[in-house]
Amino acid sequence: MIADLEHEPVVERLRRRVGETSGLVDAPLDSPMLQPYEVYDQDLFDLEMVRVYARSWVWLGDTEDLVEPGDFITGTIGYQPVMVIRQEDGSVRGFLNNCRHRASGLLYEPAGNCGKTMTCPYHNWAYDIDGRLIGIPDRARMYPDDLPTSDYGLAPIRIEVAWDKLVFGCLSRKAPPFREWIAPLAERYDLYKFGTFTRYHRELDQTYPINWKAFAENSNDDYHVRFVHRRLNKLRKQMDTIVRFEGRTCSGFKPHSEEEDATGGRTDLTHEQLLGHYADFIYPNLTPLPYPTQLILVRADPLAVDRTRLFSRIYGIDKSIEEQDFELDRLATTNLEDTNMVTELMKNLRSPFYRVGPASTWEGRAAHVMKLVRADVASPLADDEFSGPLPAN
């Protein structure tokens, strides 16, 4: 609720709006769920891009695009474009995807190879793939008093390559190491051996007229599954769902029915892992769904208060193209069912008078995520949030 937030100007304005519009919808029980006044406010969205995303670990891609020196991937963390590049020594480094001169981008494709250097298309400043500024056209004429070149290299960011496969980035120097960030999931994820999984031959990438928090809430709502996705009911023991949340992660365990073998022939996982799959969440915007022989990732990129890009990939073990297409089509259907429902909610969340109801026990994960968002929004960044050397992950 709005009371969770500090006295920021945006929060004070929202507080006045809430007071002015209260009473039409009687809400005797307090609710931690997403409220209308948290959806369409641009100032609040801008604050989330800074206080939520700038100090979070965000999934950017995978090592299948980072094989040779100069291989790169690009992405965004909140409003900030970033890039990750394989170095000559085999390491992987990340930078803001901005020339230090006038903010132009440097790499524009989702993935590729840039060779040994990158050149800004605006004024042709050039950088080595290790981030050093190595070229300024007509430097003596343009900067007769010289320019401290070493101070104008690309701005570095923290990068974690998890399980030799998944690439995560973080802008903050103060955020916990990635392993700590995902601590409640880490040991279970180690057992899957995601490094042996390979990416399916295509991905899903679509933009929807929804707020990123509304989708995050939906992704962590175990209550809706057997109604919105009822086509899956015969394949799941829906009433045996187990809801867990801790730290910056959430998990909904989904045991499978006898009609769908969850093991994929594996015997090296825990008893629970072999019984089904999980609908997990890594704050702030990643929904991993791990199975014994398959990993689904759905990332919700915030574009505007009412626009979110869903980017989805699936990884698996020994899957034919036909099997890959089956799973990708099934995921596309699930995404569509969810986004159609959330789009319907968005229409009514425009109302300044509506107040949502209390959270059920099977919405515990969603309530947890909303509390995390509000806590971050209420907490100013540290003075040295982005200063100093990159810490070890």
Image (cartoon, grey):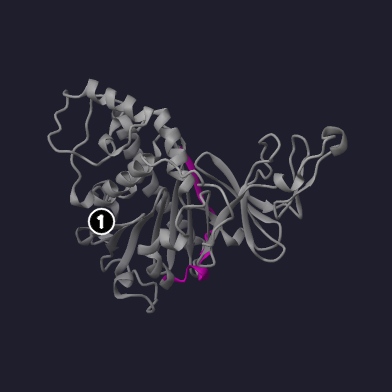
Q: Which of 114 and 150 is in front in this view?
A: 150
Q: Is mark 1 on a helix, strand or loop?
A: helix
Determine if the magenta segment contains residue 206: yes
At x 32%, y 48%, the residue is 369
Q: Can residue 337 be seen in this view?
A: no
Q: In this picture, is 183 found above or below 54?
A: below
At x 53%, y 48%, the residue is 171
Count how many numbered circles sit on residues in the image: 1
Determine if the magenta segment contains residue 250: no
Q: In this picture, is 293 found above or below 300?
A: below
Q: Where is residue 339 in the image (x, y as percent from the top left)?
A: 37, 41
Which corner quadrant of the image does residue 80 belong to?
A: top right
Q: Where is residue 287 in the image (x, y as percent from the top left)?
A: 40, 53
Q: Look at the image and give the residue range highlighted in magenta.
A: 192-207
Which corner quadrant of the image does residue 22 belong to?
A: top left
Residue type at mark 1: give it: Asn
Q: Position of residue 314 (x, y in %)?
A: 47, 58
Circle 1 packing at 10 Å, graded few (<14), some (14-19), many (20+), is some
At x 31%, y 39%, the residue is 341
Q: From the viewer's perspective, tell me whether residue 24 is left or right of residue 3.
A: left
Which corner quadrant of the image does residue 108 belong to?
A: top right
Residue assigned mark 1? 233
Quadrant in which the N terminus appears: top left
